[in-house]
Amino acid sequence: MPEMADQYQDTAGSIGSVEPAYVLIGRLQKSHGVRGEISMRLMTDFPERIRRGKVIYVGSDFQPNKITGTRWKNDLLLLKLEGFDSPESVRELVGKEVFSAVKDLPPLPAGRYYHHQLIGLRVFEDDEDLGVLAAIMETGANDVYIIDQADGQELLIPAIPEVILKIDLQQKRMNVHLLEGLRG
């Protein structure tokens, strides 16, 4: 899930060290009923933030839309958006991605980071520069950090406490200890 927060991370990528303005939280599926509701498949670990009165941003142009109602239907969240009052009016939204503004994300406890905060960090083992954290792969057991190395190769490291020693967002640096077999 793009916006997931775990021990070391949240997603939506950032380019270089520039923090994104928005993070992906869902994808609109289809209209529901006759009042202009639309179903959304969630891509966030914080569904409780999607509630009446909040503003979400829809589509690649990040159009702001105020939520006027929500309710669950199985594993989908039904949204009622201000200004959309019929099935025909919400059809233009079908298939579009839904975003939250990064500035609206809740703070995480110490030692936990959103993916977008980690993408772009330089990764070091002792004083050796291993490269830049370019992407995060979610595997279920633990995330795997994909490091772009200077030689063009990728280094995959598990996001586990034995490997990830320190994260310093101010210095844009991650210190790691590579366990035997991780270098390839």
Image (cartoon, helix red, strand yellow):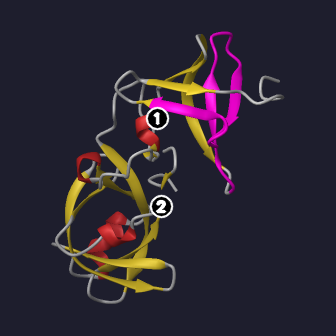
Q: Which of the labelled discs sits on residue 78, or is there none?
A: none
Q: Is residue 153 rendered magenta in the image?
A: yes
Q: Amino acid at mark 2?
A: Met
Graded by Cα atoms within 10 Å as few (under 14), some (14 to 19) or many (20 or more), the crowding at tag 2 reads: some
Query: Mark 2 and mark 1: span between their CA atoms?
Result: 19 Å
The magenta stretch is 141-167
Residue 21: which quarter of the image? top left
Query: What residue is shown at x 41% (from left), y 23% (from top)?
Result: 172
**Residue 39 x/y as whole percent:** 41, 76
Count of residue discs: 2
Q: Which of the labelled discs sits on residue 43, or is there none?
A: 2
Tag 2's secondary structure?
Answer: loop
Circle 1 residue: 118
Q: Is residue 127 rendered magenta in the image?
A: no
**Residue 20 x/y as whole percent:** 33, 37
Front one among 125 and 55: 125
Front one among 56 and 165: 165
